[in-house]
Image (cartoon, helix red, strand yellow):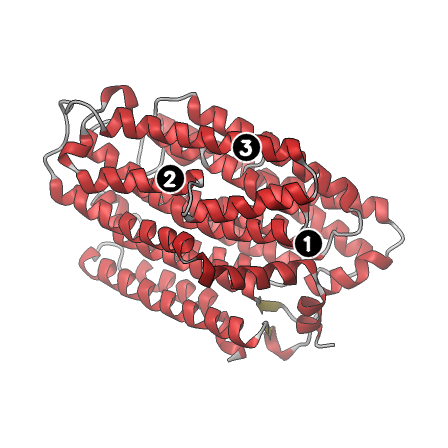
């Protein structure tokens, strides 16, 4: 079973190379990509069940024990996120044929799609800081190929902005890794966790840790480093926006969670307090952005940012309850963001515009689309009994336990404003008189709606079925607070 743990990384990499040979054979590539995505999701779900049942499994490359070999670590947190990644990406591959035109599909969409999934899965599963950098570069290379699908000056401008910011953060990343190796003599997560407290240069380590946080904060779009994200994620095709919004920023915030609960825990009075206030500012400015525009794509894109703030809040509070809330909210947000980008893509097709001032009455022609968007909005805002409520409830409990009352109040107000920003779309876009320009292509809108319906259903289950899901999240939170199981599993002590 140990060797099978690498399948979530290797299988999409092989699929990426396979479909690259037939870019123009869409009648073959489409069904093959769909079938492979479903198979990969089933495999990852089985591996996740196995890890939750039997404990963390570690694969050491080349038979070399850690820290000499490259460690691939399948622990409950990484496998939960890998399976969530595959669920969202499978929905995306079914959404893509109705969203992309054939020219965009032929421009190696499915090749970059599988490469992106492989990079995301690798980033979640690696047990090595340098290889986290490597997998970041793999997913970024794939994202560069995906973000340029299409045309127009705006897309070119935002694509360049996206590439430049990520290149700069990647440069800082590799410099930080070099400093950490120079100080500790290792980049293996588990061995770093052991050695870092015995290093004399604690001040330098804290500084390097903050620089590393800066790198991850750029990729996660934490305040004030989020300004590159809204337009960069709004201008591509909706299926690309969904993959970026649901997966890429989550790899950044996962990296913060992993590194600052496993390695840099020697000076939480400085680092985690910074996280807490950055989380508050991220929530506030993300919501302000969502309320400041009439572009429905931008409203959804801006709502990525406060979600990152909520997850960072749990990391900053650094309690078992708050970390459980962060993990729950992270899983929930991956699913619901994918669904919302799909729904907004369908809405723009149905209304013929992305300008909220020029659309109304869509629900009369497409009731399923309208009511799915309404439910998804409630899920996003954290209205009970949906999954967003479960995650936020745990986060608020963690805030009250730590007596961070101002943080709790701002989080509650942010949730209300998120709901308001979403209801603007529902009331002005879906409700009212039927506007001229609504499409008559009901088949296309239906095809765009079905994958979103699946993700919304999963998200609803995560809320209503919280009693079945939460014990697994609690297990993950316990492991994040107690590093010994992870360290022992990797180093086999």
| Drawn side of residue 255 relative to residue 341, left or right | right
Image quarter (top left, top right, bottom left or bottom right) of the C terminus:
bottom right
Residue 323 pos. (x, y %): 61, 52
Residue 303 pos. (x, y %): 45, 34
Q: Name the residue under label 3.
A: 283
Q: Which secondary structure, mark 3?
A: helix
Q: Which numbered disc, 2 or 1, marks the residue that appears first in the sequence?
A: 1
Asked if labels 1 and 2 touch by Cβ distance under 8 angstroms, the answer is: no
Which one is nearer the viewer's eye here, 190 or 174?
190
| Drawn side of residue 392 relative to residue 130, left or right | left
Instruction: State the CA–CA distance, disc 3 to disc 2.
Output: 17 Å
Mark 3 surroundings within 10 Å by alpha-carbon count, few (fewer than 14), some (14 through 19), many (20 or more): many
Mark 2 surroundings within 10 Å by alpha-carbon count, few (fewer than 14), some (14 through 19), many (20 or more): many
Q: In which quarter of the image is residue 275?
A: top right
In the image, which disc is placed on residue 378? 2
Is there any visible trace of residue 148 in the rendered image? no
Q: Which secondary structure, mark 1?
A: helix
Q: Name the residue under label 1.
A: 261
Instruction: State the CA–CA distance, disc 3 to disc 1.
Output: 22 Å
Front disc: 2 or 1: 2
Q: Which numbered disc, 3 or 2, marks the residue that appears first in the sequence?
A: 3
Residue 301 pos. (x, y %): 42, 34
């Amino acid at each position: 079973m140990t060797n099978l743990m690498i399948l979530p990384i290797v299988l999409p990499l092989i699929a990426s190379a396979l479909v690259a040979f037939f870019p123009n054979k869409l009648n073959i590539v489409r069904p093959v990509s769909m079938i492979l995505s479903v198979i990969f999701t089933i495999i990852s779900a089985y591996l996740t069940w196995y890890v939750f049942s039997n404990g963390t499994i570690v694969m050491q490359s080349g038979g070399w024990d850690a820290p000499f070999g490259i460690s691939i670590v399948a622990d409950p947190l990484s496998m939960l996120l890998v399976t969530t990644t595959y669920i969202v990406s499978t929905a995306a591959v079914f959404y893509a044929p109705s969203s992309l035109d054939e020219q965009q599909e032929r421009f190696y969409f499915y090749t970059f799609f599988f490469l992106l999934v492989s990079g995301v899965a690798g980033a979640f599963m690696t047990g090595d800081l340098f290889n986290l950098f490597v997998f970041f570069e793999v997913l970024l290379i794939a994202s560069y190929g995906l973000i340029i699908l299409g045309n127009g000056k705006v897309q070119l401008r935002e694509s360049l902005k996206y590439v430049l910011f990520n290149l700069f953060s990647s440069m800082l990343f590799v410099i930080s890794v070099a400093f950490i190796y120079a100080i500790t003599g290792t980049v293996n997560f588990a061995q770093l966790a052991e050695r870092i407290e015995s290093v004399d240069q604690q001040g330098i380590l804290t500084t390097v840790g903050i620089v590393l946080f800066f790198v991850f904060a750029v990729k996660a779009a934490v305040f004030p480093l989020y300004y590159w994200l809204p337009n960069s994620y709004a201008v591509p095709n909706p299926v690309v926006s969904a993959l970026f919004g649901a997966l890429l920023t989550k790899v950044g915030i996962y990296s913060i969670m992993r590194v600052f609960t496993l390695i840099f825990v020697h000076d939480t009075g400085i680092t985690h307090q910074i996280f807490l206030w950055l989380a508050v500012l991220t929530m506030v400015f993300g919501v302000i952005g969502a309320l400041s525009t009439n572009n429905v794509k931008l409203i959804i894109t801006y709502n990525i940012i406060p979600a990152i703030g909520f997850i960072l809040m749990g990391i900053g509070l650094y309690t078992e309850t708050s970390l459980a809330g962060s993990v729950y909210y992270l899983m929930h947000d991956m699913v619901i963001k994918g669904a919302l980008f799909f729904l907004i893509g369908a809405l723009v097709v149905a209304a013929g515009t992305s300008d909220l001032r020029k659309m109304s009455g869509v629900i009369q022609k497409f009731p399923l689309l309208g009511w799915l968007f309404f439910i998804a909005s409630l899920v996003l805002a954290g209205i009970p009994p949906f999954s967003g409520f479960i995650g936020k409830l745990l986060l608020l409990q963690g805030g009250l336990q730590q007596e961070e009352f101002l943080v709790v109040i701002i989080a509650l107000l942010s949730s209300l404003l998120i709901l308001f920003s979403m209801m603007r779309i529902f009331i002005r876009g879906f409700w009212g008189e039927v506007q001229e320009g609504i499409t008559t292509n009901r088949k296309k809108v239906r095809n765009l709606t079905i994958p979103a319906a699946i993700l919304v259903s999963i998200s609803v289950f995560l809320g209503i079925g919280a009693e079945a899901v939460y014990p697994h999240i609690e297990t993950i939170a316990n492991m994040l607070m107690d590093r010994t199981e992870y360290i022992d599993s990797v180093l086999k002590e």
